[in-house]
Amino acid sequence: QVQLDESGGGLGQPGDSLTLSCTGSGRTFSDYVVGWFRQVPGNEREFVAGITSSGNTLYSDSVKDRFTISRDDAKNTVYLQMNSLQPDDTADYYCAADVRASVIIRRATRYYDYWGHGTQVTVSS
């Protein structure tokens, strides 16, 4: 079992930066891939970024060069640094654990067995 808890969402203006945190418990945190997803009401949940146990990363095209995912296994935490925020980044953000993978980042939600409760990010002027 894995428990995940996101924090750090909030309100920002276009061009602002926000950092989301995802803290895990219940299983050796460094053993699995962690992904960040986001969802706008009425739309499917979409992959944003992922990080392997060794620190390799993958980003969606829409956030590449603006967002950075990182992990601190000593703190059981994965971060999503979001820069140059745009109104289209407005969504509920979720972190998720793919406990069957440690070196391959998969974009599809069906591979992620454990999810946090989500944190809301709103970008508006």
Image: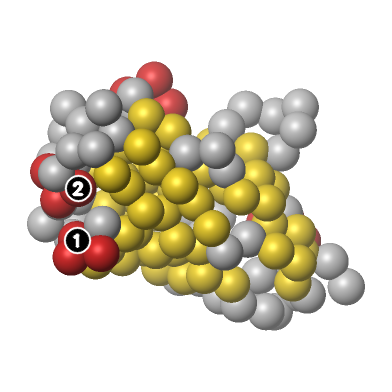
Q: Is residue 29 left or right of residue 16?
A: left
Coordinates of residue 60 in the picture (x, y in percent) = 45, 50
Q: Is residue 121 left or right of residue 34?
A: right
Q: Which mark is residue 29?
A: 2
Marks 2 & 1, CB-CB < 8 Å contact: yes
For disc 2, the neighbor class at 10 Å (few under 14, some 14 to 19, many from 20) is: many
If the image is split into quadrants, where does the C terminus sit?
bottom right
Residue type of the residue flagged with mark 2? Phe
Coordinates of residue 63 in the picture (x, y in percent) = 52, 60
Q: Quadrant of residue 11?
A: bottom right
Residue 7 vs 12, above or below: the answer is above
Q: Could you tell me which residue is drawn at 19 percent across and 48 percent down?
A: 29
Front-lying residue, 93 or 25: 25
Q: Could you tell me which residue is drawn at 49 percent across and 51 percent down?
A: 6
For disc 1, the neighbor class at 10 Å (few under 14, some 14 to 19, many from 20) is: some
Residue 124 vs 60, above or below: the answer is below
Q: Could you tell me which residue is drawn at 44 percent across and 33 percent down?
A: 115
Q: Is residue 54 left or right of residue 85?
A: left
Coordinates of residue 103 in the picture (x, y in percent) = 12, 43
Of callouts 2 and 1, which one flags the residue occurring earlier in the amino acid sequence?
2
Q: Quadrant of residue 33?
A: top left
Q: Could you tell me which residue is drawn at 15 percent across and 50 percent down?
A: 30
Residue type of the residue flagged with mark 1? Asp
Instruction: Identify the residue under disc 1.
Output: 73
Judging from the image, what secondary structure is the residue with disc 1 in?
helix
- Can see residue 82? no
Q: Is residue 25 left or right of residue 61?
A: left
Residue 64 vs 13, above or below: the answer is above
